Amino acid sequence: MSWYTEQWSEDCKFSVGYEKHLHSEKSPFQQIDFYEGKEFGTFFTLDGLMMVNEKDEFIYHDMIVHPAFATNPDIKKVLVIGGGDGGTAREVLRYPGVEQVVLAEIDEQVFRLCQQYLPITAAGVEEDPRMELAFGDGLAYVQNAPDASFDLILVDSTDPVSVGEGLFTTAFYNECYRVLNDKGILINQHESPYFPEYAENMKKARTKIKKIFPVARVYQYHMPTYPSGHWLFGFASKSLDPLKDADADAWNAIGLQTKYYNTDLHYGAFALPSYVREALDSEE
């Protein structure tokens, strides 16, 4: 057995055993590697950072998608920025009321390799007639999109470095605001509160979004293979509040079977630990 090791902080490392190194290549944008192990199944990394694995991917993909749909079950047009593994689009496409999903992913090779090595997330996504693949820069896609053209934008990005950097800027969030309709919702990667470097990015994202969106909340989920395991999404909206406006009965009536998300957890996820609240409030 060999070991994949990731540096979580200056003094903390995380290692996963693997039996096979399935694929390795450098695309025009980043280093892509796929591994196969016993504990987490197949997993892939970008530039040496864990992105998705078979065992816990359902947690991330449940939590980036379903809280928005429980807040507005009538979402019809969805833009996914990033999300090259296909898992976020997969969850969105489970909703029969959704009419259009655009996947704006900068690196087509990530999607193609996930179709081959990680079908748990990518299989069937491209074949759905509601799906549009728009391989290219996500910020550029948003800049060119018409006003009020989407109900929901899901920013399924890497950390704010390299190809993910432009998806954490004030200019990007302003463009998202413009292309969302009156009930529009933005869900974005909000990093982790635990290790200092990630916490700093969490606070920066919070500061920028609160200046743009009337509703700006943060919710948490527990991701075993991401640094510290404690991660956050931002929930921003022009008008809908995920606590006051959530319609649990309507969401449950859709009948989706989920492994992590449920409507009881929906409310609990927005109840943040004191140290996280204090860090976020310090930026206001």
Image (cartoon, grey):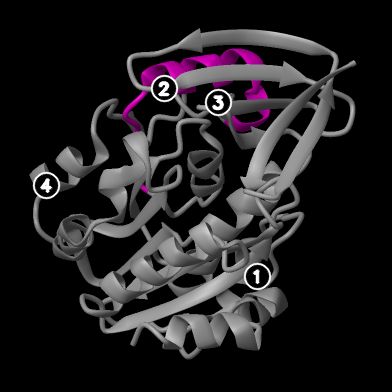
Query: Mark 2 or 3 closer to N-term?
Result: 2
Identify the amino acid type marked 2: Gln
Query: What range is drawn magenta here?
Result: 99-121
Query: In front: mark 2 or mark 3?
Result: 2
Q: Residue at coordinates 45% horizontally, 24% vertically from top-left?
A: 126
Identify the amino acid type marked 1: Asn
Query: Mark 1 or 3 closer to N-term?
Result: 3
Q: Which mark is residue 30?
A: 2
Query: In front: mark 1 or mark 4?
Result: 4
For label 4, the residue is: 143
The percent position of residue 219, horizontal first and vertical second, equals: 55, 73
Residue 54 image-quadrant placement: top right
Query: What is the CA distance from the residue labelled 2 to the residue labelled 3?
Result: 25 Å
Horizontal side, residue 24 vs residue 188: left or right: right
Query: Mark 1 or 4 closer to N-term?
Result: 4
Horizontal side, residue 94 vs residue 141: left or right: right
